[in-house]
Image: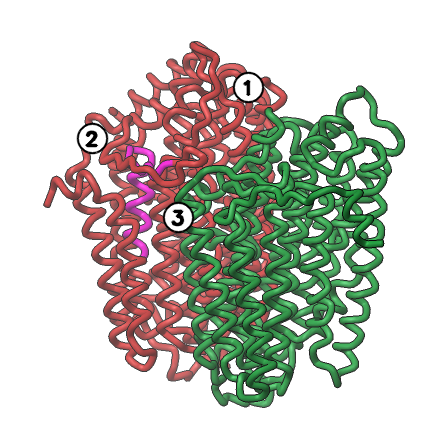
Chain colours: A green, B red
């Protein structure tokens, strides 16, 4: 039976593989397997090596990324489904480094909480593998596989505090919403495949933008695909899972979800918009405009009312997703600036948000709480953490000379450059929202600096070495990005249009 | 050494305070003396550099930028690290570097509650870097960054070391200013993307303020110009603060610690007016002309409203804060005329207001320290109990109400005069109306200031303070910090040419575009030349 089938298919010829281009994925995969093997062979004795091995794996993955960047040539495999270009490499580097910081902030949390360490790092690596694959994916099926590869481990990580009800709620909510979104996305993809007969994004664009007005099926397909990713990046009105999941999940996992997983959603969305849909801006631009404007406004307004810092960061993340969507709403007018703006924002956002979560984890080591009121008087017993948190919060608010201003500046620059009414309107939205957001960031700043510590408890916070190094890295990066924004500016001069020829 | 200063000195003077702050971060918190010394030293160094520039400055060429630093910074948006000094920025630079050391001297034994001299002084040094940088920047993005750098330290100064309502006041200050500057940034970006070279018609894509002032909005359609100016108007207007956006100021001033109030009044408010004359007007003269009657209107409303507000205040510090609104109204009225006469007066007004109101806030701080209250009702008889303090208050009140012979006069009187004859294309009748209203404002100013003096300094000492041992006369540290202020108030009062001669060439230069467009401000220019002998 099988033989007959095989005969019918004919000899399978392996498509040519550029091993160098696939090296980052393969390296990370190898380390993930190694981590699992270590668990099987050494059992409990392997526990203490797990974080170290995971870090080494991530840093080792940076090596082929750097060699590919030095080489500089754009590479393409599998008929264009897997592309390695500057944009893909930058995003891969962001995912790897964000993953590395997550490992640093996880190690004490996970080992002290008596959680399953090997599995934790194994799942983390496989999720990151999905992300770096996503950066190269230029094909509907590849994108979907990458999305599932990064999501399924994340569902499990969200429930990692197994005996905690909130963590279970977090994971279940995330899982149900995520699967629902995947289903919608897949349905949209199938519509697009039906309309165009191809899964390759470049061909898809050619096919759907051939006619003057889109067919109903294409409109539905595009809408469903965008909705699917809107869940992933937690844009309003598809954001409802985020606050509960963020609050219940272990904090390092929350940091991972809010930075890496969100960035992966954006990468997928950008791949789709800039390569697959760029010719159909009449369909996606109004939709992205609405998502962006609503996300930043609603996210910020709800964040004003939060009393828990993680929930506040969740809603602020919703708003930040709105900022990042804004340039995509003018993607057809100024494609290169829009892409560079969102990529810049992702890079800087990753640094400052991870830093903020690192402080949250450090403070919770003493207070065992994430209530904003427990940050009162932090300056009196943890001045270093207070300065760091102040830097992150005001960077998130976009105050120069901290990194965030450059991110917001690029966003505003892109929408103004488009010189359209919708662009200017979005610019005003971003400006006004920055002010609203400042209120809740500054409020925490004032609480930390000006108030007395609750109960007069001034025992200092013990910050373990790995957490400390994560803080130092993120603080330094936040300041450097703000003072010398040229660094991010040069790196993010990227384009996805090469494949589309215009 | 001089060569180094001519080539790089502007960077040094900007970042000397910041370097001091970084050094202080390494010194442990307990060593308060060291912190005070380092901060004072850093600000004195900046002052010394400023004096060197004052001596070395080429006054015959005050209209053009000198000591220009031009280095690459953010290539991807073609924003460069450009700094320069001309007659318009020199007085304001000097004001900043002059005020700061005196504030540090005053801080020697006046660290407000809850202490922590280290953080307090570090914040003030960062503030100084931001202020100096704003006055020197010649690139819009660089200007924006420095303009915003002052926000964080000021926010924390009010939030941590402020009075009862510090939380509310600091947030209000922060939110108002950020709202303005966010829209201002949109305006900057629009300038960047829309400005065209007038001869070739090519897009310029530059943030260089020199270039943008030269092209003066060429190639941008009028409606866009008006909108862009509107964005800047909000950004700078909130900072000034112009009438409808002023409500943050009384709160911030009342709640801020003395040093914060002094810096806020002396320098921070000038960032807004400086933005108008350096950026908004030269870069968009056409829009400025259209907006001028509105700016003038808000300015005179501010003058009257501020004065009436003063009459209703029961708190001395709040009264001085409201008087700032009125005084900055005069400055804005001078600017709104778009004549070199008016803008010269405005710059003088900025310096004079900085010195006089800064000094008044110092006095308010000392009164609070002695009486533990600033409620005007409860004060009295200062001339009997602390005669020197009382006389200094009297002196500053006279200066503030614009007594001829003191600095305040030269800020107000020429501004009113300029409103008689605004630049061509601006409705004359409207501005003559404004002139009358502003003149009424000076009468009101005399009223509330003299009333303040009468209620606090004259009469018998109230019973509760009659034998209070804490009420002493001016202390030595206060003399050291205040004497330079008092000296300059007199000096600029009797020799206003010292400032007018520096600013006039630069103002004429920056209004050049307006002159070309209108073919007309020469008459006023000539009048100004005759008046100030420049």
- Whether pointer 1 and pointer 2 mark residues with C-beta atoms closer than 8 Å, the reply is no
Q: Are marks 1 and 3 on the same chain?
A: no
The magenta stretch spans residue B508: no
Count of picture labels = 3
Report, in whole angstroms, how far the alpha carbon at label 1 lies from the one at label 2: 35 Å
- Could you tell whether A65 is left or right of A333 in the image? left
Q: Are marks 3 and 2 on the same chain?
A: no
Q: What is the secondary structure assignment of the residue under circle 3?
A: loop
Residue denoted by label 3: A484
The answer to whether B300 is drawn above or below residue A148 in the figure is: above
- Could you tell whether A59 is left or right of B85 in the image? right
Which residue lies at the image location 80% right of the left edge and 33% below the top edge? A197
Structural crowding at the residue carrying mark 2, measured as other residues with C-alpha within 10 Å and reported as few (<14), some (14–19) or many (≥20): some
Q: Nearer the viewer, residue B295 or B310?
A: B295
Which residue lies at the image location 62% right of the left edge and 87% below the top edge? A114
Residue denoted by label 1: B220
Q: Are marks 1 and 2 on the same chain?
A: yes
Q: Which residues are the magenta region?
A: B80-100
Quadrant of the rendering where the N terminus of chain A is positioned: bottom right
The answer to whether B153 is drawn above or below residue B70 in the figure is: below
Image coordinates for residue A434, horizontal then vertical, percent? 62, 50
The mark closer to the camera, 1 or 3, is 3
- Whether pointer 3 and pointer 2 mark residues with C-beta atoms closer than 8 Å, the reply is no
Image coordinates for residue B99, horizontal then vertical, percent? 31, 55
Query: Residue B59: which disc?
Result: 2
Q: Disc 3: which chain?
A: A
Report, in whole angstroms, how far the alpha carbon at label 1 lies from the one at label 3: 31 Å
Structural crowding at the residue carrying mark 3, measured as other residues with C-alpha within 10 Å and reported as few (<14), some (14–19) or many (≥20): some
Q: Nearer the viewer, residue B266 or A317?
A: A317
Q: Is residue B422 visible?
A: no
The magenta stretch spans residue B96: yes
């Amino acid at each position: 039976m099988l033989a007959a089938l095989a005969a019918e298919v004919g000899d399978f010829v392996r498509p040519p593989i550029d091993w160098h281009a696939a090296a980052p994925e393969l390296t990370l995969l190898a380390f993930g397997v190694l981590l699992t093997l270590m668990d099987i062979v050494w059992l409990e004795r392997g526990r203490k090596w797990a974080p170290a091995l995971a870090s080494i794996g991530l840093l080792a993955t940076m090596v082929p990324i750097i060699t590919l960047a030095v080489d500089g040539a754009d590479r393409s495999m599998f008929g264009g489904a897997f592309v390695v270009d500057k944009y893909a490499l930058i995003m891969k580097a962001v995912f790897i480094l964000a993953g590395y910081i997550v490992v640093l902030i996880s190690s004490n949390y996970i080992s002290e909480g008596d959680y399953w360490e090997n599995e934790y790092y194994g799942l983390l690596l496989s999720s990151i593998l999905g992300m770096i694959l996503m950066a190269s994916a230029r094909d509907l099926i590849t994108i979907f596989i990458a999305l599932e590869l990064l999501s399924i481990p994340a569902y499990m990580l969200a429930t990692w505090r197994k005996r905690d009800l909130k963590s279970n709620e977090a994971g279940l909510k995330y899982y149900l919403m995520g699967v629902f979104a995947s289903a919608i996305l897949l349905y949209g993809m199938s519509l697009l495949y039906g309309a165009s007969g191809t899964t390759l994004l470049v061909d898809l664009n050619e096919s759907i933008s051939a006619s003057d007005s889109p067919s109903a099926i294409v409109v539905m397909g595009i809408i469903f695909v965008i909705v699917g990713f809107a869940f992933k990046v937690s844009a309003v009105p598809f954001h409802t899972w985020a606050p509960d999941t963020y609050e219940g999940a272990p904090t390092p996992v929350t940091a991972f979800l809010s930075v890496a997983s969100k960035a992966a959603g954006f990468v997928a969305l950008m791949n789709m918009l800039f390569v697959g849909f760029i010719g159909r801006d009449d369909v996606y631009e109004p939709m992205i405009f609405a998502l962006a404007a609503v996300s930043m406004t609603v996210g910020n307004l709800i964040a004003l009312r939060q009393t828990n810092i993680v929930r506040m960061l969740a809603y602020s993340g919703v708003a930040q997703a709105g900022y990042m969507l804004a340039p995509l709403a003018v993607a057809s007018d100024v494609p290169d600036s829009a892409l560079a703006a969102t990529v810049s924002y992702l890079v800087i956002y990753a640094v400052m948000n991870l830093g903020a979560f690192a402080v949250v984890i450090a403070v919770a080591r003493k207070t065992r709480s994430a209530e904003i009121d427990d940050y009162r008087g932090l300056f009196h017993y943890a001045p270093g953490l207070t300065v760091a948190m102040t830097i992150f919060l005001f960077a998130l608010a976009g105050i120069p000379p901290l990194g965030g201003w450059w991110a917001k500046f690029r966003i505003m620059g892109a929408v103004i450059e488009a010189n359209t009414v919708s662009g200017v309107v979005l610019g005003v939205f971003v400006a006004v929202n920055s002010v609203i957001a400042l209120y809740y960031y500054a409020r925490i700043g004032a609480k930390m600096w000006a108030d007395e510590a609750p109960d007069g408890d001034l025992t200092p916070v013990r910050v373990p070495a790995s957490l400390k190094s994560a803080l130092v890295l993120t603080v330094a990066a936040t300041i450097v990005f703000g003072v010398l924004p040229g660094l991010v500016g040069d790196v993010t001069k990227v384009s996805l249009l090469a494949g589309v020829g215009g | 050494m001089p060569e180094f200063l001519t080539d790089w000195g502007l960077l040094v003077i900007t970042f000397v305070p910041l370097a001091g702050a970084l050094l202080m971060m390494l010194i442990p918190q307990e060593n308060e003396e060291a912190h005070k010394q380092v901060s004072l030293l850093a600000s004195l160094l900046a002052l010394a550099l400023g004096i060197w520039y004052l001596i070395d400055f080429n006054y015959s060429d005050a209209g053009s930028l000198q000591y220009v630093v031009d280095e690459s910074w953010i290539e991807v948006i073609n924003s460069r690290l450009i700094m320069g000094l001309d007659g318009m920025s020199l007085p304001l630079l000097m004001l900043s570097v002059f005020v700061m050391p005196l504030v540090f001297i005053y801080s020697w034994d006046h660290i407000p509650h809850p202490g922590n001299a280290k953080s307090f002084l570090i914040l003030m040094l960062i503030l100084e870097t931001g202020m100096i940088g704003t006055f020197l920047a010649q690139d819009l993005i660089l200007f924006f960054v420095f303009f915003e750098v002052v926000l964080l330290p000021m926010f924390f100064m009010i939030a941590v070391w402020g009075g009862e309502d510090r939380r509310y006041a600091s947030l209000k200050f922060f939110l108002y200013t950020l709202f303005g500057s966010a829209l201002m940034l949109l305006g900057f970006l629009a300038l960047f993307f829309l400005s065209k070279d007038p001869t070739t018609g090519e897009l310029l894509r530059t943030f260089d303020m020199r270039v943008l002032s030269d092209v003066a909005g060429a190639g941008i359609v009028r409606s866009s110009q008006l909108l862009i100016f509107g964005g800047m108007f909000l950004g700078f207007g909130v900072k000034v603060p112009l009438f409808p956006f002023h409500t943050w100021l009384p709160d911030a001033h009342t709640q801020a610690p003395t040093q914060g109030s002094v810096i806020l009044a002396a320098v921070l408010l000038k960032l807004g007016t400086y933005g108008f004359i350096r950026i908004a007007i030269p870069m968009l003269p056409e829009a400025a002309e259209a907006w001028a009657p509105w700016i003038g209107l808000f300015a005179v409303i501010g003058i009257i409203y501020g004065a009436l507000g003063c009459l209703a205040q029961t708190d001395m510090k709040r009264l001085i804060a409201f008087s700032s609104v009125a005084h900055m109204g005069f400055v804005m009225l001078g600017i709104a005329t778009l004549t070199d006469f008016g803008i010269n007066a405005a710059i003088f007004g900025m310096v004079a207001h900085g010195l006089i109101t800064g000094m008044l806030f110092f006095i308010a701080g000392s009164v609070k320290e002695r009486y533990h209250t600033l409620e005007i009702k409860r004060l009295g008889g200062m001339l009997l109990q602390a005669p020197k303090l009382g006389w200094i208050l009297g002196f500053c009140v006279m200066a503030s109400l614009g007594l001829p012979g003191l600095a305040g006069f030269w800020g107000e009187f020429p501004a009113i005069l300029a409103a008689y004859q605004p630049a061509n294309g601006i409705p004359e009748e409207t501005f003559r109306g404004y002139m009358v209203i502003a003149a009424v404002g000076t009468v009101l100013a005399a009223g509330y200031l003299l009333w303040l003096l009468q209620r606090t300094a004259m009469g018998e000492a109230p019973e509760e303070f009659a034998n209070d041992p804490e009420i002493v006369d001016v202390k030595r540290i206060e003399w050291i910090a205040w004497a330079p202020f008092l000296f300059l108030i007199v000096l600029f009062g009797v020799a206003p040419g010292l400032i007018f001669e520096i600013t006039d060439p630069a103002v004429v230069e920056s209004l050049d575009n307006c002159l070309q467009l209108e073919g007309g401000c020469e008459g006023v220019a000539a009048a100004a030349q005759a008046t100030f002998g420049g």
